[in-house]
DNA sequence: TGTACGAGAGGATCCACACCCCGCG
DNA sequence: ACCGCGGGGTGTGGATCCTCTCGTA
């Protein structure tokens, strides 16, 4: 990875795709990620302009550079004058956004620059990928807090899980009384968690929101929320799963969760930075549940400060690279109808807990199979007590026949 | 209240070998 | 610069073992 696009090897790389672990120019990014529905789901972000190897997560207004967590931490150390630099979080995106949408996602990113980059695409590519043309693009905020462009699942929205459809489109910023990522109202089809992403049916909503994802990052949610409860007398009744639901109690609990030192949000960023930085790269974050928990905690604390209104700089996309669902940073998750604590029936809550536990029980940890051919071989390989045996040796388990030779 | 024990959950490990990757000629 | 070859390392799933947590006596 480096300065040149990993795909074309020609143009300078601009964005980083974690799923592909690749640095791509905008043209190739668009090209590669329009290939199929799965690739469209890859979340990408700008490439750190300092190390050119890690996804950027903040934009330094003073230096006009995009920085990854490590470079930001190194360059804006609290001990230096740079620590006061005004920094803006960089949002991830998925799908195939147009130049205008990219500039909306990244306000500092001029549309002309995007167009210039995207203009490198061939005409045929443009035709081929016409489906994600600007007129059809939609942007959804998925569970990872990623701006998801052009959700092309044409499934009836149906009734959202656990609530009614929200008739109006509210921005996260409105909801949180603070800037929250791309709040450009020019995006006429901008969907936030409070709203339903078109194409998500009940199950889709439930599954796609993905309790699993939350759980992947919050391996022991009871412990986590238990700790929250210990810190907050206000959430004695509803702290646990309600924290997950992100009702106002969450904020009350959040504000009590590892209260950061008073100061600007930048200071707080620095305060919490070690949690993320120590987790090394974002990739390691993604693969390290423990680190993700740390990172989530940091983000959670950060969001609590945002709610307190101490700063208007931070937004929902903060630290989204850490992998924890930013829904937890939002006031309300997409599946939760707007309601107050008191109006949230305890039975519904317990039902939610039950569903969560049930799903957790049946969940398989997502394991990415890198080589299908190897999996295919492993699937048919004979075993003895679960261990592979040499070809021709006696076996006690044959996946093909479900038989035992001895 | 503190201790001991059992049950259950979940992570780590092992195995063979096709194949990926990289260095070398 | 390109191609082919060879060798080392990797990844794959099920069973089992081990550790840890939780509930109960």
Image (spheres, coloured by chain):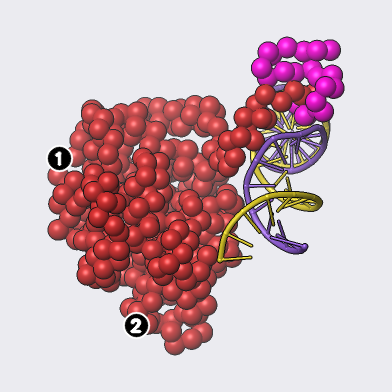
Chain colours: A red, B purple, C yellow
Residue A82 appears at what percent x and percent y? 43, 84
Q: Nearer the viewer, residue A269 or A385?
A: A385
Mark count: 2
Quadrant of the frame with the C terminus of chain A: top right
Q: Nearer the viewer, residue A43 or B19?
A: B19
Mark 1 element type: loop
Question: What's the residue at 40%, 45% (across, down)?
Answer: A39
The residues colored magenta run A386-406
Q: Is residue A403 magenta?
A: yes
Residue A87 appears at what percent x and percent y? 36, 74
Q: Could you confirm whether marks 2 and 1 are on the same chain?
A: yes
Residue A345 vertical position relative to residue A48 in the rendered view, above or below: above
Q: Is residue C2 left or right of residue A307?
A: right
Mark positioned earlier in the residue sequence (2 or 1): 2
Question: What's the residue at 47%, 71% (across, down)?
Answer: A3
Label disc, if present, on residue A84 of the rendered structure: none
Q: Is residue A6 left or right of residue A309?
A: right
What residue did someone put label 1 on? A167
Residue A327 appears at what percent x and percent y? 36, 48
What residue did someone put label 2 on? A62
Question: Can you see residue A72?
Answer: no
Residue A369 vertical position relative to residue A124 in the rendered view, above or below: above
Q: Is residue A51 left or right of residue A237?
A: right
Q: Quadrant of residue A320?
A: bottom left
For disc 2, the chain is A
Mark 2 element type: loop
Question: What's the residue at 58%, 35% (across, down)?
Answer: A372
Q: Nearer the viewer, residue A346 or A131?
A: A131
């Amino acid at each position: 990875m480096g300065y040149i696009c990993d795909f074309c090897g020609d143009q300078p790389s601009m964005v980083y795709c974690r799923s592909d672990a690749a640095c791509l120019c905008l043209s190739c990014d668009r090209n590669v990620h329009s290939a199929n529905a799965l690739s469209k789901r890859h979340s990408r972000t700008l490439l750190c302009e300092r190390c050119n190897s890690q996804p950027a997560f903040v934009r330094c207004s003073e230096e006009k550079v995009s920085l990854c967590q490590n470079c930001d931490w190194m360059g804006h150390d609290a001990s230096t004058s740079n620590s006061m630099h005004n920094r803006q979080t960089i949002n991830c995106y998925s799908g195939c956004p147009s130049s205008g949408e990219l500039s909306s996602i990244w306000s500092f990113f001029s549309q002309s620059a995007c167009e210039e980059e995207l203009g490198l695409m061939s005409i045929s590519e443009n035709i081929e990928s016409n489906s994600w043309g600007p007129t059809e693009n939609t942007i959804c905020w998925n569970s990872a807090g990623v701006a998801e462009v052009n959700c092309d699942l044409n499934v009836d929205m149906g009734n959202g899980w656990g609530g009614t459809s929200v008739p109006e489109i509210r921005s996260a910023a409105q909801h949180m009384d603070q800037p929250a990522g791309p709040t450009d109202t020019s995006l006429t089809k901008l969907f936030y968690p409070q709203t339903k992403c078109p194409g998500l049916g009940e199950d889709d909503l439930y599954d796609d929101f993905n309790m699993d994802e939350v759980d992947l990052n919050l391996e022991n949610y009871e412990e986590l929320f238990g700790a929250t409860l210990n810190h907050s007398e206000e959430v004695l009744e509803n702290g646990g799963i309600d924290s997950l639901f992100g009702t106002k109690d969450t904020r009350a609990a959040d504000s009590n969760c590892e209260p950061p030192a008073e100061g600007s949000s930048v200071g707080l960023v620095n305060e919490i930075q070690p949690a993320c930085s120590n987790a090394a790269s974002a990739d390691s974050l993604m693969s390290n549940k423990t680190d993700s928990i740390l990172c989530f905690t940091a983000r959670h604390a950060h969001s609590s400060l945002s709610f307190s209104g101490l700063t208007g700089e931070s937004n929902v996309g903060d630290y989204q690279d850490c992998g924890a669902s930013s829904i937890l940073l939002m006031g309300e998750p997409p599946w939760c109808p707007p309601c107050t604590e008191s109006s949230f029936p305890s039975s519904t809550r317990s039902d939610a807990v039950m569903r969560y536990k049930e799903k957790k029980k049946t969940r398989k940890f997502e394991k990415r199979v890198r080589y299908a051919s190897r999996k295919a071989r492993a699937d048919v390989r004979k075993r003895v007590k679960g261990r592979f045996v040499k070809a021709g040796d006696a076996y006690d388990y044959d996946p093909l026949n479900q038989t035992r030779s001895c």
